[in-house]
Amino acid sequence: MSQSHDTETHNGEMSDRLMDAVLSAGVDAGITETEVTVAQHVGGLTRFANNMVHQHVVGDDTTVSVRVILNGQVGASTTNDASTDGATAALKRALEAARLTPSDPSWPGLAGPSELAPWADRYDQPTAEASPADRVKVVAELLGELGPQQRGAGALSTSATQVSFATSAGARHNARSTRASLSTVVMGPTGESGWAEDGGIGIRDIDGKAIGTRAAALCHDAANPQPVEPGDHTVVLASSAVMTLVDHLGLCAFSGKAYEEGRSAFSGRLGDEVASPLINIYDDALEPGAMGLPFDGEGTPKSRVDLITKGIACGVVHDRTSGAKAGVTSTGHGLAGPNPWGPYASNLVLAPGSQTLDELIAGVDYGLLVTRFWYTRMVNPKQSLITGMTRDGTFRIENGQVVGPVRNLRFNVSILDSLTSCDGVGDTLQTCCDEGGDTRVPALRLRSFAFTSVTDH
Amino acid sequence: MNELEATFGEIAQRGVDIAIGHGATYADARVLDMVDEHCSVRDGEVEGVRQSTSIGIGIRVIADGCWGFAGTRNIDTRSVENTARMAIEVARSGRLLQPDPLRLAALTPTVAYWANPIIEDPFKVPLAEKLDLLVAATKTMGAVPGVAVAEASLAAWRRQSLLVTSEGSRIEQLIVQCGGGIEATAVGDNEAQNRSYPNSFGGDYGTEGFELVRRLDLVGNAERVGQEAVMLLSAESCPSALTTVVLDGSQVALQVHESIGHPIELDRVLGMEAAYAGTSFLTPSDVGQLEYGSKHLNVVADSTTPGALGTFGFDDEGVAACSTPIITEGRLMAMLTSRETAAEVGLTQSGATVRAQSWAHLPMIRMTNVSLLPGSANSLDELLDDIDEGVYLETNRSWSIDDRRVDFQFGTEWAREIKGGKLGRVLRNATYSGRTLPFWASLDAVGGPDLWRAWGLPNCGKGQPPQIGYVAHGAAPARFRNVQVGTP
C-alpha cells in the first residue's frame, strides 16, 4: 500500500485490544471456549494486457473472526467492523449460532498455549508500502524486453498481511508477512505465447526485466508450432508444470481427513512405494524461501511433514479435528474454522535433485518439453487422475536437443503413476505462486505421460 | 428501501465529487453491504455454521485516460475522500503504459431502486430448521449400506449496494440469493464415487428466497443419491466410442458455460484476460458471421431471468439488466460487453454484464444468465427415442478446456448406456471430449420448456487473482451426435 493511501496500516495494538475485548466478552457470556482472529490486509494489483495497464487496484480490509463453543456446540461469525462494538457483536452472533447447533461429539477443543518455531522475518516494508507507480515501473521494465510485435499480459500484486490469534485456552500468536508476485504471458503475432513468473516476500527481488526477457524468448521460440501425435511420451516438465502435479497431490492425497475416510489416493498406501525413489515431497512453511505465516488457521504452529520420501508414501497432514480422529496431534495444516474441507498442505516442496534442465533434456531421445499446464482438474481423486492442457510453450525433444515447438496437447494422467516413471530431477527450486500458492519445485523428467488429444495452436 | 442511500448517499457522492475535482473525467462510488451464511453437515453432525458480514466502498475513476480503483472498509468522509484521491493516484500512475485514453459507451443516467422478489427470506428461516434439514438428508444418505461419507450444505447471500456515478446515476439494489445441495461418497478398493443432487460442487443456487431450497426436496432425494453412489462402485467403466450422447440439463449448463459463456466475453476476446484465464477463439469480426452450431443452438444472455443466479436490476456500471440474443439458429450475434469494451469495438451501448465480487474488487465482464433456449422435445424419452446406441451423461464431475476455449473434456458422475431408445446399464468414470464448434454443430435436439430450468453456478472464476462470480445457465437435456466418450 502506498504511504499516501491514508486508510489503514498494520496495527498490533488494535488487534490486541479487539482480541482482549472478545475474550473478555466471552467470559462474561459464560462461553466455554472462545477463539478470535484479527486479520489486517493491505494490497495492490497492477494488471496489464496488450502492453497497457488495464486493471489497477489498491485496497485494504480488516476482518475479525470469532468462534465460540458451548459444550461442544460451535458457532462462528466474521465481520469487517473492526471496532470493539463490531467485534463483540460478532461474538454475539457466533453465540446465537452455537446455541442453535447440535453438539459436535468429535469437537477437539481450541488450541492452547504453544511456542512458535524460530522463524525468519517475512515482512518487507518496501513491499508493504509499494505504490502503484512502483508496480508500474516493474511492469514497464518487463514490457520493455518484448519484441516489436509481441504483446504482454500479466499481473503484479503486492500485499502485506498481519494476523493475530488468541483463544480462551491460552493460545496467542501474532505474525506478519508480505508477498509480491509477477507473472506474464507474452504473445506473438501468429498466436504463439511464452510465460514466466517470479515471487517472494519482497518486490525488490522481482526482476521485471528478466521475466520479460524469459517470456519473450519463449514466445519467440514457440512460433509456428508443428503437429504432434498424442500418446504416451517422455516429458521434461519445467517447474511450473511440476507445480500443477504437486498441488493436485495436495488436493487428492495429502489430507489426513480424506485419508481417514478412504477417499485419498494415499488411503491404505502409507508405507507403499507410490513414486520413483528420486521423488521426495514434504510440506514446510518454516524453511527459508517459504512464504506465509508460522501458525495455521486454528493457531497450531506449523511443522514440517514428510509426505513422500524416496518414493514411499510416508505421511499426511492434519488439523485438530482430523488429528483427533486419527489419534495424532495437528501438524499445523488447519484452515480457519469452521472448515468442512479438512487440512491442507499449502507450502509443498518437491526436493531438488542434481541435474540441470539441459541435462534432463539431454537424456531424452524423443519427447516433449512442457512449460506449464492449464485448466487442470481432478478426474478421479482416489487414482490421482487429472486432466488438463499444455500452454505457453511446448516443444519437441529429439536426440537430447529441443528441436522446435509443437501444438498444445491434452493430458490424462495418474500423478502418482507418472511420478513413478521419473528418472531425473532438476537441481533448481523455483517458487511457483502464480495461482496464489507457495509451491517450490524443480523440473522433472518423466518417462511416461499420457497425452490424449492435440489442439491446432 | 433506499437504506444505503439514506446512510451513505452523501458520502458516496462526496467520493465522486473529490475524484472529479482532482481531474477525473469519470468516477463512480459503490457501497456494498454483504451478509453471508453457510451451513454444512457431514454424516449427521454439524460441521460448520458461519455467518459473515462485510461492508465497504470502492471508488473507480478514469484520470489521464486510465482506470484507477481504490477500496476501503471505512465509509466515513475522511476515508472516502482519501480513497478517492488514491484512486486518482492509481489511475495516473498507469499513464506511462496507456497510449490512448480509454472511452466508455454512452449511458443515460438512472435513479432507481431494485430488489429481487422473494417469498421466504433465507436469513429469517431459523438456523435450527436449516440444520435439521441437512442432518436429516445426511442421515438418510448415510443409512444406505456402502455410503462412506454423506454431506449437505446450504448457503445464503444478501447484497445491498448503492452506486453513485459522476454521470448522475444513483442506483440502490437488494439482491438475496440462496441454495444448497447434498452429496454421497462411496469408497471401494481403488475407487471413490460421488453422487450429488441437484448438482455437484455445492448444489443449485438462485436469486430467490428459501422457497428454492424447499423446492429442491433434499431429504426426499437423499436415499436415491446414496444408492446411486454405491451403485457406481460396481458399475462398468464407460467404453470408448464415437457415439450419440444425451446430456442432462446441468451438464448442458456447464457445457454452455465453458464453451459459449467464456469465449463470448469481449474482454477475453480482446486479450485482457490472456495471462490467466486465457483468450478466445473468437474475434470481434465473428459477430454476425460465425456459424457457432446447428440451427438448434439458440442462446441469450438474459440478466432478467426470474430467479436465476445471474439476475439483477442493474450491473455494477449502472446499465439496466437486459436480454441479448447471443446465438440465433446457430449464428453468433453478439458478445458480453462492458462500457469500455463496447466502445472499443464501436458499439453504442454495453450489454449490462459488469460485476465485481465485492466492494474491494474492480468490476469486470461476467456472465449473467447465458442460456440455451428450449427446443421442442417434450421429454427425455423423446430425446432417447431414435438412438440405437449411445450414452446418457448426468451431473458434472470434472471439467477442462484449453486457453482458447476449443478443446474440452468433461466427466460426469453418472452415465447410462442407451440401447434401442432406452436407458440401460449404469456406467462409471465416463468422460466425453470434443472441440467447441464441431460439438455445437452436432446438436440435433434440445428439450422443450417443461424440461428447461436455470442452473446456478456460484463458483465462476475470472481475473487474476480470480474473482468469484455468481452466474446461471438455463438449459434442458440435449442430444449431440458423433461425440467421443470413454474412461481416461
Image (tube, rainbow, N blue to C red):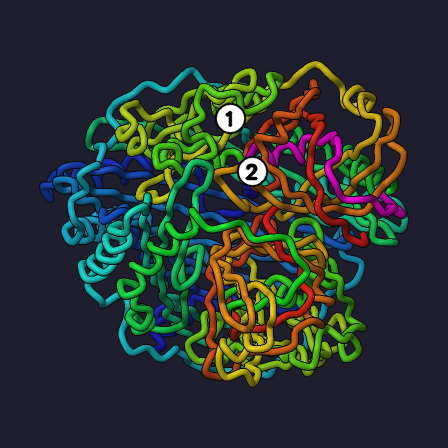
Q: Residue B172 location in percent, x, y?
A: 42, 75
* Residue A332 colored in magenta in the image: no
Badge count: 2
Residue appearing at x 65%, y 27% in the figure:
A430
Q: Which amino acid lies under the numbered mark 2 shown in the image of this protein?
A: Glu
Q: Which mark is residue A122?
A: 1
Q: Residues within 10 Å of mark 1 (few under 14, many from 20)?
A: many
Labels 2 and 1 in the same subunit: yes
Residue at mark 2: chain = A
**Foreground of the two, B471 or A214:** B471
Does B280 sit above or below residue A437?
below
**Foreground of the two, A227 or A181:** A227
Q: Which amino acid lies under the numbered mark 1 shown in the image of this protein?
A: Arg
Q: Is residue B164 left or right of residue A365?
A: left
Residue appearing at x 63%, y 31% in the figure:
A418
Q: Residue B176 location in percent, x, y?
A: 36, 70
| Residue A254 in view (yes/no) | yes
Q: Residue A398 location in percent, x, y?
A: 87, 30
Question: Which residues lie in the magenta part?
Answer: A222-248
Residue appearing at x 43%, y 23% in the figure:
A270
Q: Which mark is residue A129?
A: 2
| Label located before the other in sequence (2 or 1) | 1
Does A423 sit above or below residue A125?
above
* Residue A237 colored in magenta in the image: yes
Q: Secondary structure at mark 2?
A: loop
Marks 2 and 1 sit apart, C-alpha to C-alpha, by: 14 Å
Q: Is residue B14 left or right of residue A397?
A: left
Q: Residues within 10 Å of mark 2 (few under 14, many from 20)?
A: many
Residue at mark 1: chain = A
Does A430 sit above or below residue B90?
above
